[in-house]
Image: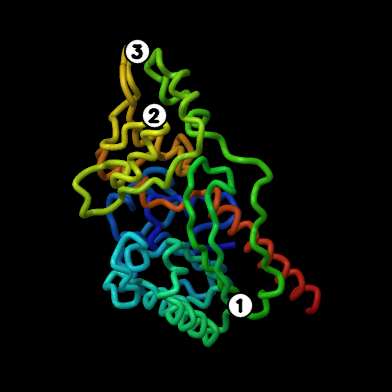
Amino acid sequence: MQSIEFCAGAGGQAIGLEQAGFRHAALVEIERDFARTLQLNRPGWNVLAQDMNEFDGRPYRGVDLFAAGLPCPPFSLAGKQLGDMDERNLFPAALRLIDEIQPRAVMIENVRGFLSAVFDDYRALLKEQLRKLGYATDWRLLNASDFGVPQLRPRVVIVAVRQDLSDVFDWPDVLPHNPPTVGEALRDLMGANGWLGTNAWAERANEIAPTIVGGSKKHGGPDLGPTRARRAWASLGVEGRTIAEEAPDRDFVGMPRLTVRMAARLQGFPDQWQFYGRKTTAYRQVGNAFPAPVAKAVAHNLRIALTVRKLFAAHAA
C-alpha cells in the first residue's frame, strides 16, 4: 500500500508508516534541512522540498493513505490558540489535497490543544467537511508512553476513512507494560565516554521523560524547554538549559545534558537515524517529531482495515 505524507519533518511518522508496511509515494517537507535528513537516511524515498499550500495532489490521486503532522502552534496550549485564524494553520491545505488525492484513509497528528473547548466549532466543521468528501472521522488523544516511548508525549491523532471502511478500523491497543525510564533508556549513551557517574545517574533518572520541546524557529538555541520543563528534567538529574555535543567525560561532575542522539532515542527514532545540520537544526528536527512507534501502531491498524476491505471487495466480485 502507498502513502503520501505532508509536513514530514525529520521522518518520525514516515518511519512508523514504513514499519507498518506502507510505501511512500512522496514525502513533502518545506524545510530543506529536514528534507535533507529524509534523503540522507532513505535515498530511495521521493522527498519533495515544497510548500504544502502550493502542492498539486492530483498526480497522486488514489494513494491509499494521506498522512500529515500539521503545525502545532495554531492549537498549542502554550500559544495564542488562534486556530483557523493562524496563518500557520494548514488544515485548509490538507482538505484541498485530500479532495485532490482521494485517499482511502487519512491520518493527521497534532497537539492535544486541538481538543480544547475553544476549538469545538472548528472540530465540528472539520468533521463535516471531511464527511462531504466521503470520510468518517474520529480522533483520539494518544500518549507515546503507552506505545513504548520513554516520554510523556500526548498527541491527538485524527483518522478519517472512507465511509465503507468505518466499521473495520479500530484504534490500537496500548502496550501491557510501561516503557523504560530515562535512566534505562539512556544509560549506554550517557556512559559512552566512560563517565564514572553513569550508574548513579541512571538510578536517579527513574521516570519517563517529560515532553521534549524546543523545536521553534524563534527559539534562541536548543534546550529542553521553559522553566517548568527544566525543573522536571532536573528532578531526573538532567541539565535542561542546553543540549550537549557529546556524552559526559570520565571525570564529569554535576548534572549531565542530553545530546541530540539521546533526545532522538527518547522520541522513538532508531539509533542509526541521522540528522542533517548542526546541533540547533538537528535538535529542532527531533523536538518536532511524531514518535515512530505511535505512528506505526495507528498505521498498522489502518493497513489492516484497508486490507480487509480489499479482500471483501474481491470476494464480492
Q: Residue at x 44, y 82 (%)?
A: 121
In this view, the mark in front (3 or 1) = 3
Q: Determine which residue is flagged by label 1.
A: 162
Give the image location of residue 178, x and y in percent: 61, 40
Mark 2, secondary structure of its residue: loop
Residue 57 visible in image: no
Q: Determine which residue is flagged by label 2.
A: 237
In this view, the mark in front (2 or 3) = 2
> Three-letter amino acid code at disc 2?
Gly
**Mark-to-mark CA distance, 1 and 2:** 48 Å
Q: Sequence-wise, which precedes: disc 1 or disc 2?
A: 1
The correct choice, above or below, for 60 with respect to 27 in the image is: below
10 Å neighbourhood of mark 2: few (<14), some, or many (≥20)?
Answer: many
In this view, the mark in front (1 or 2) = 2
Q: Is residue 281 left or right of residue 183?
A: left
The C terminus - image quarter: bottom right
Give the image location of residue 22, x and y in percent: 57, 57
Residue 146 visible in image: yes
